[in-house]
Image (cartoon, rainbow, N blue to C red):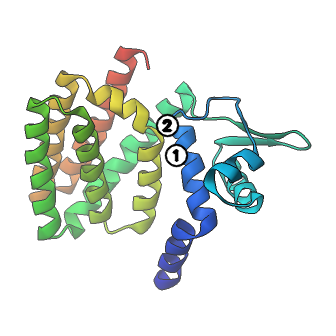
Amino acid sequence: MEDLYLHKEVTDKYSLRGRVFNKIREDILSGVYQENEELKENTIGAELGVSRTPVREALRQLELEGLVTIIPNKGAYVTGITSKDIQDIFIIRSYLEGLCAKWACEHITQAQIEALDEILYLSEFHAKKNHYDQLVELDNKFHDLIYKASGSKILDHVLSDFHHYVERVRKVTLSRPSRAAKSREEHAAILDAIIKRDGELAEALAHEHIINTIKNISEQGL
């Protein structure tokens, strides 16, 4: 069953439909397409060098994710991510990230611990240089590694999607030096708890980390 699941995951990611889907989703989440903008199959197909079929299939899949609304006999329109969606995602993440850190205490490898420790070192270096793009990338890597260390492909998949959905907001929050420094401290505390195999503490710290991000978002009026 696991092999079938992994095979499907790879097929979806690298198939023509998967590539088209990922490109359109990325453009919606990054703001290339604005809310209520029409997504024309012919135009997108021409831009991506594909026929209308994979575009149509991708739009249907994006409708299931709530990013697109398809109106019969009219077309497909961007729904996007609302402010409420962002709040909901972070609140849900706060609980799932806690569970993820707790499970990581049971399954993390030494290689993953060393990789996380290196990320913390690089984060401190780039924070001093005000390299905010690198900080966002390192933040992604830190969370991705924790997801994988949980030993749950389901949790990894769900949290990776949530993380990706709010990336624009995260870029803004991490561009604040005070939040960037605090985020690194929180990451270090989470990793320390995981290394000590203290599941309850790791869960609490990971939950608090996301709650602090929510507070930071509210302070900035995002």
Q: Nearer the viewer, residue 53 or 183?
A: 53
Name the residue tied to disc 2: 30
**Could you say whether the residue bearing mark 2 is in a helix, strand or loop?**
loop
Q: Residue at x 49, y 73 (%)?
A: 10
Q: Nearer the viewer, residue 138 or 23?
A: 23
Q: Residue at x 32, y 69 (%)?
A: 151
Q: Nearer the viewer, residue 67 or 95?
A: 67
- Tell me where residue 149 appears, x and y as whole percent: 26, 64
Kind of residue indicated by mark 1 = Glu
- Tell me where residue 208 appears, x and y as whole percent: 27, 36
Picture mark count: 2
Q: Residue at x 37, y 41 (%)?
A: 94
Disc 2 to disc 1: CB gap under 8 Å: yes
Query: Mark 2 to mark 1: distance in Å?
Result: 6 Å
Direction from residue 67 to residue 26 in the image, left or right: left
- Tell me where residue 105 appears, x and y as whole percent: 20, 62
Q: Is residue 197 visible?
A: no
Q: Please, is residue 69 above or below residue 217 in the view?
A: below
Sort mark 1 into few (<14), some (14-19) or many (20+) by Cα contacts within 10 Å: some
Quadrant housing residue 77? top right
**Could you say whether the residue bearing mark 1 is in a helix, strand or loop?**
helix
Kind of residue indicated by mark 2 = Ser
Quadrant housing residue 189? top left
Q: Nearer the viewer, residue 86 or 200?
A: 86
Name the residue tied to disc 1: 26
Work out which quarter of the rendered image holds the C terminus and state it.
Answer: top left
Direction from residue 16 to residue 176 in the image, left or right: left
Direction from residue 220 to residue 70 in the image, left or right: right
Direction from residue 190 to residue 88 in the image, left or right: right
Q: Please, is residue 179 above or below residue 144 in the view?
A: above
